[in-house]
Image (tube, rainbow, N blue to C red):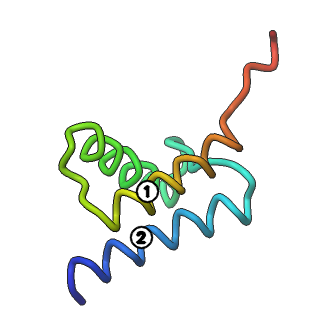
């Protein structure tokens, strides 16, 4: 499995998780923590300018999807 295939596999796992559970991965659940850590690492690469196309475009779409299910403060 090439690095590109692994990246696409993880990307699809995160998108599938968000679409089925209607929330972002949690840092408190072990199985979800891997997805969260992958997302955080990709965000760091994007902010540093190291994430190249076509990954950059795909990751920006993922960030838009994750913003839809961003945790809201219930005490506002």
Q: Residue visible at 21% across and 77% down?
A: 3
In the rendered image of this protein, does residue 22 appear above or below residue 40? below
Compute the Cα span from label 2 to label 1. Answer: 11 Å
Q: Nearer the viewer, mark 2 or mark 1?
A: 1
Residue 8 placement: quadrant: bottom left
Q: Residue visible at 53% across and 63% down?
A: 14
Residue that numbered label 2 is attached to: 10
Q: Residue visible at 69% across and 49% down?
A: 23
> In which quadrant of the rendered image does the N terminus lie?
bottom left
Disc ID at residue 69: none
In the rendered image of this protein, does residue 8 appear above or below residue 62? below
Which tag, 2 or 1, sits closer to the chain's start? Answer: 2
Q: Position of residue 25 (x, y in %)?
A: 56, 50
Q: Residue visible at 73% across and 19% down?
A: 73
- Asked whether 31 or 13 is in front, the reply is 13
* Left or right side of 65 for 43: left
- Asked whether 54 or 73 is in front, the reply is 54
User: In terms of secondary structure, where does tag 1 sit?
Assistant: helix
């Amino acid at each position: 499995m090439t690095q590109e295939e692994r990246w696409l596999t993880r990307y699809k796992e995160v998108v599938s998780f968000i679409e089925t559970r209607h929330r972002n991965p949690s840092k408190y659940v072990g199985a979800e923590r891997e997805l969260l850590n992958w997302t955080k690492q990709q965000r760091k690469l994007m902010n540093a300018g190291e994430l190249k196309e076509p990954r950059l475009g795909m990751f920006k779409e993922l960030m838009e999807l994750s913003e839809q299910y961003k945790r809201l403060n219930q005490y506002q």
